[in-house]
Amino acid sequence: MNDENTNKKNQQLMNGNVIKIALPKGRLMESTKELLEKSKIFLSGSERNYKPESNISEFEFRILKPRNIPKMVEEGLVDVGIIGLDLVEDENASVEFILDLKTMPVFLMVAAPKNFRDSTAPKTLTVASEYTEITKGYFRSKNKKFRIIKTYGSTECFVPEFADVIVDHTQSGRSLKQNNLKVLDVIMKSTTRLIANSKLEEQKLETVLKLKKMLSAGLKKMNLNYSEFLTEEQIRTNNF
């Protein structure tokens, strides 16, 4: 950052309108970075830099693990975040939803081996999932007895040896097909969202609205091709 930008940043900090923006590390980052660039927001620095600089003096970026973002926004450790709705729901985070960015659409669903039958299933289901809170809410709503095995990726590998069913997300259904799984139910659809802390000061709110406006303009330039993704009907009917 040059001296002129540094001085401008310092002035913005004094004015209290600089916002900290959490970006998701990993698979969400590619589409997020593309959207930022379409919105004329450019990041600089190496890929391992978790505090990239940008061309917008009011924006401070932090790259964080996706699971950390919802609660960090809720607690005001960062002001806004870009993250999937599924993780916001699973973390029970109390945040403001500012904008649906429509990227990375996934369906959170219950799946099982193709020979699974509810009539012959154990009275207490063993469920493998990364989404423990969503899983609890779903099976309680169905009055099902269950226990959860917390997973950290490759959830589809847990059935049938270690679990009866899984709760996981899918876009294309490829992994389900490769592992001979069928969908029992769809819990929710998730897309990437812009979320904000619910108690932001007025100066920061103005900056959040600026970010929203820029991202909205960028969305219009995005080539959101959903043809490779399944529809909810295709998932529910196992048409993949």
Image (cartoon, rainbow, N blue to C red):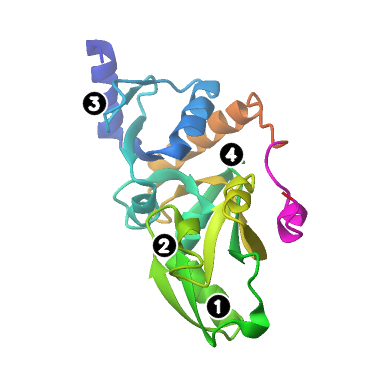
Q: Which residue is mark 3?
A: 10
Query: 10 Å neighbourhood of mark 1: few (<14), some, or many (≥20)?
Result: some
Identify the amino acid type marked 2.
Answer: Glu
Please name which of the two marks, 2 or 3, marks the residue nearer to the observer.
Answer: 2
Circles 2 and 3, Cβ within 8 Å, touching? The answer is no
Identify the amino acid type marked 3.
Answer: Asn
Report which quarter residue 19 is drawn in: top left
> Residue 114's spot in the image, x, y percent?
65, 65
CA–CA distance in space, label 1 to label 2? 17 Å
Question: In what element is the residue under mark 1?
Answer: helix
Judging depth in this view, the residue of 16 and 126 nearest the camera is: 126
Q: Residues in magenta? A: 228-239
Q: Which mark is residue 139?
A: 1
Q: Which residue is mark 2?
A: 91
Identify the amino acid type marked 4.
Answer: Thr
* Quadrant showing the N terminus: top left
Report whether 18 appears left or right of 226. left
